[in-house]
Image (cartoon, rainbow, N blue to C red):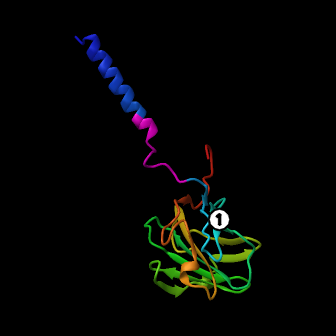
Amino acid sequence: MMTSRRLLAAGVATTAALALVAAAPEASAAPPRERTVVDPVDAGASYDIVRTVLSSAPKAGRKARVVVTHDRRVRAGDGIDLWFDLDNDRVPDVYLTGMAYSEYVVFRARSFKRHGRDISDKQCFSLTMRKRNAIVRFRPDCLGPSRAFAVAARSFRQGDPASAADWAPRPERFTRRVLSYAPSGPGA
């Protein structure tokens, strides 16, 4: 027979265990459909990133979107580099680089420092730079199945030293993940 002290101790232990389980995020919890990453002001950056918004594609066959907002309007000579992790291995799969009022190129990536062949002809990614935004639209499953994606961005001014570039979220680090496609069906 349990004494009241043992019963009370067992009740407290059970309550504490339940509180820990409830407070811990589920290991299988799906990433969100949208994520906003606010970047601190970098006074030394020549083209400062202030916010990056990642949005899931509304459904299969549609495009996801990344919007990088800067501290000022885009000018000739401004550029942006983006790396995409499409397969959850925290290694870049795609590298996109472009200049304002010019063209952009998309490469298969191997790391933040090396890239492979030009995959621009697949037409999976597009870049537009207007007002204060660099907008990338892309098919997350362009290179294979993609459940979630993450991005790293670097903005720069042509001719400025590398130290004047601004990274979001940090140099050679990805944002937290976002679902590649918004869930559909009941309960979505």
The answer to whether residue 136 is above or below residue 33 is below
Is disc 1 placed on a helix, strand or loop?
strand
- Identify the residue shown where x is 40% and y is 31%: 18
Q: Residue furthest left?
A: 1
- Identify the residue shown where x is 51% and y is 51%: 30
Q: Is residue 65 visible?
A: no
Residue in the foreground of this view, choosing between 57 and 149: 149
Residue 22 sits inside the magenta stretch = yes
Residue 121 drawn at (x, y percent)? 62, 85
- Residue 155, image quadrant: bottom right
Q: Which residues are magenta?
A: 20-31
Residue in the foreground of this view, choosing between 80 and 32: 80
For the stretch drawn in magenta, the main secondary structure is: loop
- Identify the residue shown where x is 62% and y is 52%: 184
Q: Amino acid at mark 1?
A: Val
- Residue 81, image quadrant: bottom right
Residue 21 drawn at (x, y percent)? 41, 37
Q: Quadrant of the N terminus?
A: top left
Crowding near pointer 1: few (<14 within 10 Å), some, many (20+)? many
- Identify the residue shown where x is 46% and y is 84%: 114
Residue 118 sits inside the magenta stretch = no
The answer to whether residue 72 is above or below residue 109 is above
Q: Is residue 158 visible?
A: yes
Q: What residue sits right under mark 1 in the picture? A: 50
